[in-house]
Amino acid sequence: MKLASIQKITALNSIEGADNIEVADILGWKVVVKKGMFKVGDLVCYCQIDCIAPELPYFEFLRERKFRIKTIKLRKQVSQGLIVGLDDLECFKTNASTLVGEMGSMTTYYYEEGDDVTELVGITKYSKDKEIVAYEVSKKPKIWWKKWIWLFKQKVLVRLFPSLKKVNRSRFPSDIVNKTDEERIQNMPRVLEQCKGKEFNVREKLDGSSITIICNQKGKYRVCSRNFELHNKQNEWYKVFESTQFNLVMDKLYTHYGGEKAVVVQWEFIGTPQGNPYKLEKNEIRVFNIYVGEKRLNPIDFLVVCTELDIPVCPDLGNTTLNHSLEDLLKMAEGKSALNSNTEREGIVMRSLDGSQSFKVVSNKFLLKNGE
């Protein structure tokens, strides 16, 4: 995913009642900009929502939002993302993605549509998981004698015997399975034409924290959050894995597929860490991906095995033939959650029945209501 990239402004439209601002179309996004600042066809740097901008003078106007780029509404116009002109882009660093030449003391940079400038700008992805990462860190005990044992182990034994040092987390094992992060439809609007007439399964996108469980052989599991593999069991991901006895589900799946290939299950952890928006009696898990070996099950096979083995899944909203505009899908994404009729759903995830294409559509109503 390119958090900041070079994109083309495809349209500029006025906003009713606004004299100084207008709305620009980039990919499938609409972004409010200062009137007259850009022209149709201009290449600009587009920074996505759900990202954190660096604490630089250029982004000082975002300080009150803790430098987070969110969905906002200006004069009744939804604006998603941030546009940076190419001239301003060069102030972030002295090197760009493509350096073509130098003329005297002036360095000339050339960009092409689609260039990834995330590293240049310094944009990083915002993640709700950061709010509960603290559980991964070994805390100093409060009881005095336990504290002395903890200090002795950390300051003395670990230095004498480095093998005793436990690593709380490591990088996500992307060599085995991809991270759980579907692409937004606004970043890939051409799919609507490319997949027109194709059958898609629609599931509710739940407001939770994703977990990936890898089972290489029966009884041995690897537990991962969205960005890390976890080695310390003192965290919310491990707690919900154990409290829901999900190891039994993994055992059933592993046995079902013959026990010869690795089984990977990805699911959404919903409940108290997110403020319990669905008003659940206890923390729950809802599966949305199953891999056998390196192959992800298509929606048909996924539904069959989950029904047969009684595996809890993200709510199924049915199938549809893709013949929608972007506006149609954004409207479809809105609605109440299947888990609680008083809760606004976050959006939907659409996956073709053959498993070849998938994307998410996040509800703008949800984003605005929750300050996202």
Image (cartoon, rainbow, N blue to C red):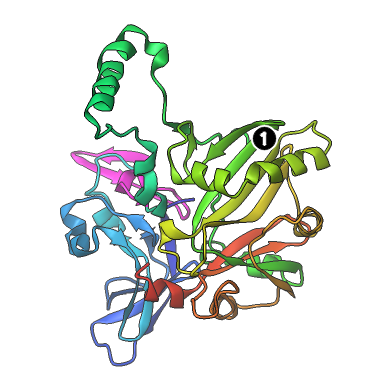
* Residue at (34, 32) in percent of width and height: 138
- Magenta stretch encompasses residue 247: no
Extreme residue in the bottom direction: 17
- In the rendered image of this protein, does residue 295 appear above or below residue 312? above
State the count of labels: 1
Q: Is residue 174 visible?
A: no
Front-lying residue, 170 or 70: 170
Q: Secondary structure at mark 1?
A: strand
Give the image location of residue 276, x and y in percent.
45, 65
- In the rendered image of this protein, does residue 141 appear above or below residue 370? above
* Residue at (56, 65) in percent of width and height: 205
Extreme residue in the top direction: 160
In the picture, measured across the screen, residue 296 lies left or right of residue 339, that is: right
Report the amino acid beneath label 1: Cys
Q: Quadrant of residue 261?
A: top right
Quadrant placement of the C terminus: bottom left
* Residue at (43, 37) in percent of width and height: 234
Q: Quadrant of residue 202?
A: bottom right
Please give the residue where the numbered disc 1 appears in the rendered image.
Answer: 215
Q: Is residue 344 visible?
A: yes
Front-lying residue, 275 or 24: 275
Give the image location of residue 87, x and y in percent.
26, 56
Front-lying residue, 346 or 270: 270
In the picture, measured across the screen, residue 124 lies left or right of residue 224, that is: left
Give the image location of residue 4, x and y in percent.
39, 53
In the picture, measured across the screen, residue 63 lies left or right of residue 163, that is: left
In the picture, measured across the screen, residue 157 lies left or right of residue 300, that is: left
Give the image location of residue 201, x and y in percent.
72, 67
Looking at the rendering, the stretch of residues picked out in magenta corresponds to 97-125
